[in-house]
Amino acid sequence: RAAKAPRRGPSPPSAGRREIRTVGFLGISDYGLGQLKVLADRYQVMFATGKAKQPKHAEGLDAQLAAFCQERSIEFLGAVDANAEEFVQRAKATDLLVIGGYDKILHAPVINAPRHGVINTHLGFLPLNRGCCPTMWAQLHGLPQGFTTYRVNESIDHGEILDRFDAGPQLGALRDTNREVYDHLAAKAVGRFADALDRLEQGEALLPCEGKEAYHRQGLPNDSWLSFHWSNKFLRRFSLSLDFHPYLPGKCTVASPSEGGSATLFLAIEGDAEGAADLPKSGDREGDVGEVLAVWQDAGGSYFLNVRTRQGAVRCRVCRGATPAAGQLLGSAGDVGVHPIAVDVAEDVLPLERYLVKAPAANPLPLRLAAGAGAGAAEGQREVLRGAADCLRAPVVSILSAL
């Protein structure tokens, strides 16, 4: 699982040594800052930029980036438009441009400006897990967690592969929060970056980005609404996948006379409730699904609930909202938002089929069709571009390519 790149058989042939002396750095993220430190120890970093926007989970990183640039005598440009002609000219003076968390789509002039192109690290397997929030979607679909370092082209999250890391089947799943998954992969991405740069300089041929493709556009699954008609395992998986501090995990409604109807309650699903196996399955008794069976407070002051589900009951930790009383009914929701999930979905993982890309990304141009390709293929690729643009505009940005 620690393979340097996705290989079969002998090592790829050399493409000729790539001399890298000057680099530019675009954007910032937790792992991007670590990668910048690796770059500064190896090359002359000509400039570094921040993000165009500032999502919650990236607060404070610009200040850290500016301080590091001052310490290492790197020109810090702040927020820039990387597609502007002035920036393209800057990029032409570099051997390599590294994306460390930039939040705009790059166009051909800046992609082609550096001598050896642009590389990016995406915290998901490509091309199977393209688009926004890949660690979240991998957890929901039961896909492998990992990252891909690749050479950027005009397709979104698609390009020749320099490095790929498989974290193994245990990371995420029903054990780790999405924040924990992200932090683990971010550390691995920094730790493996120097070795990837070594192989890039030595001229190792990059590998094609090929295989089954799936793409997730901006938006949260079911708009983060819970359904207690889901399986207990899927409730747990859903909650963990959304648990990315400072963002909150799933939510539901609870009757609130003081607010004239219902209030929103944010819950972390922590697993089956004690004795859940002995509870009668709710099955056809839909009125019981969502009932609060017990409420208690631990020594640290956190409130917990046991809530009836169609499979028994789950233990929930109250993250935000007024704690309901035993006997109150929590509402379930389904088919909500741009990524709807049925209120009574039976599977323990979210099916991937609806996210598969029917018209795989062209390499390098996303709208360049093969001879005889029809309008349907073009529209499929335009939808990926529209989704990528939405992802970069969203307040919850991609945890990998948009960080």
Image (cartoon, rainbow, N blue to C red):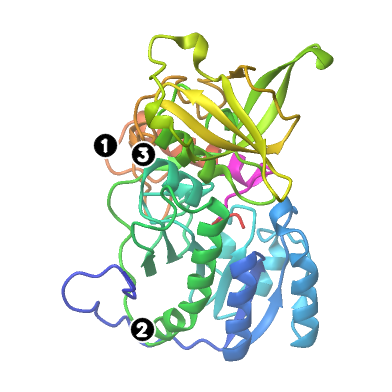
Residue tagged 3: 357
Q: Is residue 365 magenta?
A: no
Where residue 196 sits, quadrant-wise, is bottom left
Looking at marks 3 and 1 on the same chain, the residue that comes earlier in the sequence is marked by: 3
Q: Amino acid at mark 3?
A: Val
Place of residue 141 in the rendered image (x, y in percent of width and height, measured from the top left): 38, 41
Q: Residue at x 59, y 83 (%)?
A: 39
Place of residue 29 in the rendered image (x, y in percent of width and height, measured from the top left): 64, 64
Asked which secondary structure carries label 3, the reply is: loop
Looking at marks 2 and 3 on the same chain, the residue that comes earlier in the sequence is marked by: 2
Above/below status of 238 relative to 114: above
Q: Is residue 366 visible?
A: no
Q: Is residue 315 visible?
A: yes
Question: Is 332 in front, or is 15?
Answer: 332
Looking at marks 1 and 2 on the same chain, the residue that comes earlier in the sequence is marked by: 2
Tag nearer the camera, 3 or 1:
3
Asked which secondary structure carries label 1, the reply is: loop
Residue tagged 2: 203
Residue segment shown in magenta: 388-399
State how far apart marks 2 and 3 are (Cα): 32 Å
Looking at the image, the residue that sits furthest to the right is 258
Q: Amino acid at mark 1?
A: Gly
